[in-house]
Amino acid sequence: MGLMTFMRTKMGYFLVGGIAVVLALFVLEPLLQQGTAIFGAASRTVVGSIDGEEVKYDAFNAKVEQTSAQFKQQYGGVMNAQMQSMAVDQAWQSEIANVVLGKEFERVGLTVSSDELFDLVQGKNPSPLITQYFGNPQTGQFDRTAVMTSLKSRDKNPQLAQQWLILESEIEKQALQQKYNKLVSNSVYVTNLEANDEYTNRNKLVNFKYVNLDYSAILDANVKLDDADYKAYYEENKKRFDNPQERRDFKYVSFSILPTAADSAIVKAQIEKLAADFKTTPNDSLFSANNSDVKIPYTYLSKGKLDPAVDSVIFNYPVGSFYGPKFSGNSYKLVKVVDSRFSPDSVKAAHILINPAQVGGEEKAFKLADSLKALAQGGSNFADLAKKFSVDGSKDQGGDLGTFARGAMVPEFENASFNGKAGDIKVVKSQFGVHVIKIEKQVGSSKVVKLAYIEKNLAPSQKTRDAAYKKATAFLNEVKSDNFSALAQKQGYTVGVADGITATQGYAPGLDNPRQLIREGYEADKGEVLPQVYTMDNAYVVAQLTGIKPKGQLSLEDVKKQIEPQVLNAKKAKMLTEKFDKALAGTSTIEAVAQKVGKTATPVQNMVFANPIIPGLSQENKVVGTVFGSQVGKLSKAVSGDRGVYVFVVEGFTNPAPLANTFKQKQGMMMNISQRALGGAFQALQEKANIKDNRVKFY
C-alpha cells in the first residue's frame, strides 16, 4: 500500500521488476555487486561470455535467485524444476539483451538526456516503473507525493539512495529501448500494392472440387526406403535442419516410487487415528496446523475455494460437525466446521494507514488511530483526515480503496471489513501498520464457513522407495553401453525416450526433475550410460546418452531417424502421383479422375487463401496455394500435400469489393510487421554476437 509498502515489500524484488519493452520475456538487468566466486578454480567462476564480456557466477546467480523469488511471489511459493530453468533462462536473456542492445544503442547514437531522465522520474510523464512502484495496489493510482518524499529522504538514507540509483538506471534502459523500438518501427513501410494484396488474400473466395489419395492408404511396411530417398528429402529441406543450439538425446528406464497398496493402508490407518484425535482436541486450529500437509487459512472461506469433494458438501454441514476421512485426488481430507455465517460478497471501504515508525512506536500509532476514529465518528470528514494523516498512496483519493472481495486484503483488514457493517469505523493492525477503516458499503450476502482442515497426502513409504532404488541400482550395475535396450527388455522394463534436450532445459518427456541428469548428460560421450541413479518426483531413473546434435547445420545422420516419417510420405507421394498420372491420361473431368482411382470428387465452397484448411482433412498450404494460382475449369496435375496427394479443378473465384480504406489497411499491416521487426532485429543482433554459454555447468 503506497510508499511504505513499496519500501518494505517490493524493493527486495526490485532488481527483477523492470518492464521489458522490446521483448516481454526479458527482465531488465539490475545493477548488482559482484562478489567472489564460490568455486575454487577460476574456470568455474564464469557462467559465459557475450561479445567478450564475461558473466560472473556470483552476479548472475543473484539475478537468478531474485527472478526465482519473483516467481514464488506470483505462484504462491511453488518452484519446480521447470520454473527454476525459466528463471535461469530469463536472467541469461537479460544479460544478452543488456550487452547486445547496449552496443546497438551506442552504435546508432541513442542517449537519454538529464532533462529526459528528470521528466521520467518526477515530471509530467513519469516512467511506467515510477508509476508501478509509487502507486496504490488497490486503485492503481499514481502517488506523486510519495515520489517527492522518497527523493528528499535519500540524502539522509544511503540504502534508499542506492535503490534510487538502481531505479534510475532501469528507467534509462527502458527509455533507450523505447527509442530503439521507435527507430525500428519507423523503418517499416507498406506499399499500396502490398495492402491490396493482403486484403485480397483475406477476402477473395474460391470454389473447387478435389480428389485425394491419403498417404495412410499405403502401409509403411510396403514402402522400401534407401539412402537416396533420405538424401533427396534432406537436400530439399536442408534449411529446416539448422540447429540453433546443441541438443542431446537420451533413453532411460524408470523405477516407480508411487505408493503401493500397503502404503495406502498405512496412510489410511494414520488418518483414522488423526480423525479420532481431531474430534476431541481442545484446539482445532493448532491441531490442524500441526498435522496437515496442506495449509488452509483459519479464516472464513466462501464456496469454491476448497477441493470439489469437500466444497460440494461442507457448506451444508452445521457448526460443530465433522467430515471425513474423505479421499480425493491424492490425499485424505478431514474437516471440522468451526463456525458459519452469512457475509457480504464484497465491501467498499476507505482507510487511513499509520506507520508506527513515523509516530514514535505502535502504542502512539494506536492512540492516533483511536483519535482519528473518534473525530470521524464525531462528524469530521474521513477523506480529509486520510489526506492529512495517511501514509498510503490512497490518501489522495481520501483513503478510498474501492470495492473488493474476500482474499484481496490481508486477513486482519479483511476480517474487520467483512465482519462489521456499513458505517462502522474500526482500528486494526496489519503487516503494513495501523489502519483506521471506514466500511462504506457491503454488497451481496453468501454463506461463509470457518474450518479446521487437515489434508494428508498419499505418499510412498521408505520401504517402497528402498525397493525401487535397489532395482535401479542393480540395473545400473549390470547395464552396458551396447545392451541398454536389450537388458531392459529382458528384465521387463520399458525404455523411455527424451530427444532434443537443450543444456538448460528444466523438463524432459517422462522426467519431472531432470536437471542433474541433463547436466551429467552434457559431460558424457555418445553411447555412455550416465553414472548414477537419478531421483525424480515419482521414480528413480537410469539413463543413457544416445545422441549429440551439435549447434549449426545438422548432418543427414543426425536427423535420419527424425525425418523417417516425412521421407516415407515423400516416397508414398511419388507412388500416389504415378497413380494419379495414369488416371489423368485421356481424362478431362474431375469426376472421371475420381472414378478411375475409386474415389469421389469433394466440393469446397468459399475458401480463402489466408485460411488454407481443407474441411474434414487438414491444413494444406501447398495445395490451397496451388488452387489460388490455377485457371478456372482446368484440371490440375497431381499436387503432393502434407496428408496426401490431390487433383482438383477450380470452379470459380469471387473477388472482394475494392479496398475502401487503403490507409487503415496499411496501418494495421505496419503494426503487425513492426512487432515482428522488433523481434527480428533482436534475433539478428543475438545471432551476430559471440556468445559462449556455460550455464549447464552451474545449474
Image (cartoon, rainbow, N blue to C red):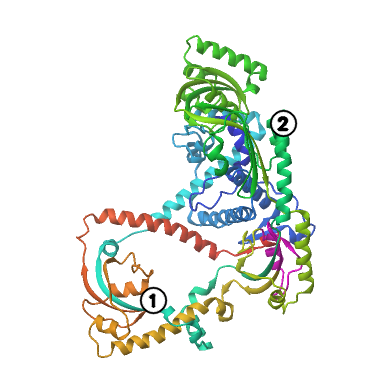
Q: On residue 382, which mark appears?
A: none
Q: Residue at x 56, y 78 (%)?
A: 561
Q: Quadrant of the C terminus?
A: bottom right
The amino acid marked with disc number 1 is Gly
Query: How many numbered markers are drawn?
Result: 2
Q: Secondary structure at mark 1?
A: loop
In the displayed orientation, state which residue is furthest to the top.
378
User: Picture coordinates of residue 320 (x, y %)?
Assistant: 62, 29
Q: Quadrant of the N terminus?
A: top right
Q: Nearer the viewer, residue 56 or 284?
A: 284
- Please name the residue that numbered disc 2 is placed on: 280
- Please name the residue that numbered disc 1 is placed on: 641
Q: Pick whichever of labels 2 and 1 is earlier in the sequence.
A: 2
Q: Nearer the viewer, residue 61 or 523?
A: 523
Q: Secondary structure at mark 2?
A: helix
Asked if residue 301 is positioned above or below residue 666 in the image, the reply reads: above
For marks 2 and 1, give the CA distance: 71 Å
Q: Mark 2 near mark 1, Cβ–Cβ under 8 Å? A: no
User: Picture coordinates of residue 453 (x, y %)?
Assistant: 64, 37
The amino acid marked with disc number 2 is Thr
Does residue 603 appear left or right of residue 271 in this picture?
Answer: left
Q: Nearer the viewer, residue 62 or 524?
A: 524
Asked if residue 532 is positioned above or below residue 626 in the image, the reply reads: above
Q: Please give the range of residues in magenta.
A: 513-542
Q: Is residue 305 visible?
A: no
Q: Is residue 77 visible?
A: yes
